[in-house]
């Protein structure tokens, strides 16, 4: 509750004496893009959406992939899957990589125009021979169909925020990012206490031109005392409205 009171004070129009920037995660910026009303309720009042399902298996795949790529990082050589997909790069060795991949810290940058300190946690970074940096994100899935980035706007914006953050660290970041998918085979005849994964890499050419405008719009959203309108396709807002209507009917005398 103290945190939410501080949030309201920070974004109250005309507020003075705010100490330092306001932390805003990449996921909260995505929430604003998904639905400004849900974002306002989350940050101003503490009415958050229920947590999504927690998939510990995804975390296991993430940890194992990091360990595997770190092996090749120490050798200064490309991972075999990078060679398989013709990617001329090696896993990046950088003194801050451990911080950028760590949950409490991540890669951070203060955006003075909005007052936000934006942060996000990268999975991996690769480096081309010319020194440019490539953002890489691991994704665990299980599908028998082709893996594509169709209808994956959230994935794409995630990469673009990472590119924006890393460029503000003074790095030369490639517009092309890579999604590394670990696809669990579900066609085996039996489980036998193991899963078999196939690795594939999908490139994505991103643009972070939208990020700063979105941050300024997010600040303007939080500066208002009343929540803005919902996004037209926000299922959470639709649920809240319908639940409220039905609850009101129960109290009609």
Image (tube, helix red, strand yellow):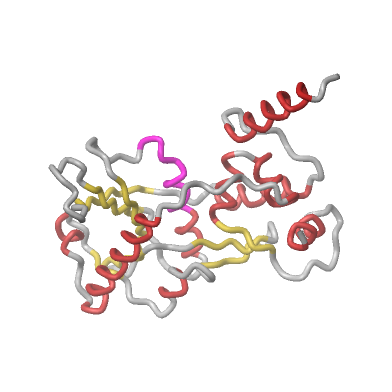
The magenta segment: 150-160
Q: Residue at x 38, y 77 (%)?
A: 94
Is 129 on the left or on the right of 4, as rendered? left
Most foreground residue, 242 or 20: 242
**Quadrant in which the C terminus is drawn:** top right
- Above or below, comparing residue 23 to residue 218 in the picture: below
**Quadrant in which the N terminus is drawn:** bottom right
Q: Residue at x 74, y 62 (%)?
A: 3
Most foreground residue, 95 or 9: 9
The single residue placed furthest to the top in the displayed view is 253
Q: Residue 99, position in %: x, y? A: 46, 74
Q: Residue 185, position in %: x, y? A: 20, 46
Q: Residue 46, position in %: x, y? A: 71, 51
Number of numbered discs present? 0
Q: Residue 43, position in %: x, y? A: 70, 52
Q: Is residue 156 magenta?
A: yes
Is 86 on the left or on the right of 219, as rendered? left
Q: Is residue 85 magenta?
A: no
- Above or below, comparing residue 31 to residue 171 in the picture: above
Q: Quadrant of residue 250?
A: top right
Is 96 on the left or on the right of 58, as rendered? right
Q: Residue at x 78, y 59 (%)?
A: 10
Classified by dominant secondary structure, the portion drawn in magenta counts as: helix
Q: Quadrant of residue 229?
A: top right
Is 53 on the left or on the right of 69, as rendered? right
Q: Residue at x 23, y 50 (%)?
A: 200
């Amino acid at each position: 509750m103290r945190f939410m009171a501080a949030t309201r004070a920070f974004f109250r129009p005309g507020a003075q004496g705010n100490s330092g920037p306001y932390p805003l995660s990449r996921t909260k910026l995505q929430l604003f893009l998904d639905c400004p009303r849900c974002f306002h309720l989350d940050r101003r009042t503490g009415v958050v959406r229920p947590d999504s399902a927690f998939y510990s298996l995804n975390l296991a795949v993430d940890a194992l992939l990091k360990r595997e790529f770190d092996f090749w990082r120490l050798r200064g050589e490309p991972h075999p899957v990078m060679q398989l997909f013709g990617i001329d790069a090696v896993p990046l060795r950088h003194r801050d990589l451990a911080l950028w991949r760590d949950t409490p810290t991540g890669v951070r940058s203060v955006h003075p125009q909005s007052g936000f300190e934006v942060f996000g946690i990268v999975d991996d970074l690769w480096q081309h021979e010319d020194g440019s940096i490539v953002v890489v994100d691991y994704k665990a899935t299980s599908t028998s169909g082709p893996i594509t980035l169709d209808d994956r706007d959230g994935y794409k914006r995630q990469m673009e925020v990472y590119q924006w953050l890393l460029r503000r660290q003074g790095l030369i970041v490639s517009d092309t990012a890579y999604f590394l998918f670990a696809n669990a085979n579900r066609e085996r005849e039996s489980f036998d206490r193991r899963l078999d994964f196939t690795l594939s890499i999908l490139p994505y050419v991103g643009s972070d031109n939208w990020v700063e405008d979105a941050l300024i719009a997010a600040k303007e959203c939080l500066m208002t005392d009343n929540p803005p309108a919902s996004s037209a396709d926000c299922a959470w807002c639709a649920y809240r409205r319908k639940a409220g209507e039905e609850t009101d009917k129960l109290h009609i005398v």
